[in-house]
Image: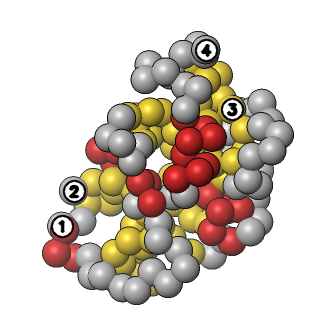
Amino acid sequence: MLFVIFRLGPERYALEAARVIEVIPRLPLRPQPGAPDFVAGLLNFRGKAVPVLDLGVLTLGVPCAAQLSTRILLIQYILKDGAKRLLGLIAEEVTDAVKKEPDQFVSVAAGQAPYLGKIALEEGGIVQCIVPERLLPQDVEHMLFDATPADGSAV
């Protein structure tokens, strides 16, 4: 399997490349007043309103640094009811992809972070998978997606 590798603070994380639709530069976002602080805003992606999360705020409580390698990973997010929506994830140092076999990852206790998945050991340390469907609590999922049609167009 191919994984997109990125950083959040000093730690390395991975996301299955098959889940990534596109990697785009960090673009200006429309703020979403009343949304949790990890919701960076809305992105106009080819005429579709796409919610974007800042993974730095979500995981570390600190926004991702504004640097050239900070990107928005546009993914297909699967809602708890099975519907699919576009979701953007801001991450740092999105510059690499690696091939890993599923058996190279081992389970660890996620503690208070249910979106953290299995880990793989590498020469450079540990890389941990992000599980997209565990990123959003159900109330936030409803807030971000209930008014968004399946095609992502504005209502």
Quadrant of the frame with the N terminus: bottom left
Secondary structure under tag 1 reads loop
- Which of pointers 2 and 4 lies earlier in the amino acid sequence? 2
- Which of pointers 1 and 3 lies earlier in the amino acid sequence? 3
- Which of pointers 2 and 3 lies earlier in the amino acid sequence? 2
Q: Which residue does the image show at 55% across and 57% down from the upper left?
A: 137
Asked if the residue under mark 4 is in contact with the one under mark 1, i.e. CB atoms within 8 Å, the reply is no
Viewer-nearest residue: 4 or 32:
32
Q: Nearer the viewer, mark 3 or mark 4?
A: 4
For disc 2, the marked residue is: 1
Name the kind of residue labelled 1 in the image. Glu
Viewer-nearest residue: 9 or 133:
133
Q: Nearer the viewer, mark 1 or mark 3?
A: 3
- Which of pointers 3 and 4 lies earlier in the amino acid sequence? 3
How far across and down, in percent of the image, does residue 34 sit?
80, 44
How far across and down, in percent of the image, does residue 68 sit?
69, 46
For disc 4, the marked residue is: 155
Q: Which of marks 2 and 4 is in front?
A: 4
For disc 1, the marked residue is: 101
Secondary structure under tag 3 reads strand
For the residues labelled 2 and 4, the Cα–Cα distance comes to 37 Å
Q: Which residue does the image show at 44% across and 19% down from the upper left?
A: 151
Asked if the residue under mark 4 is in contact with the one under mark 2, i.e. CB atoms within 8 Å, the reply is no
Asked if the residue under mark 1 is in contact with the one under mark 2, i.e. CB atoms within 8 Å, the reply is yes
Q: Which residue does the image show at 45% across and 80% down from the upper left?
A: 110
Viewer-nearest residue: 70 or 47:
47
Viewer-nearest residue: 23 or 37:
37
Q: Which residue does the image show at 75% across and 33% down from the upper left?
A: 29
Q: Is residue 97 above or below residue 50?
A: below
Name the kind of residue labelled 3 in the image. Leu
For disc 3, the marked residue is: 42
For the residues labelled 2 and 1, the Cα–Cα distance comes to 6 Å
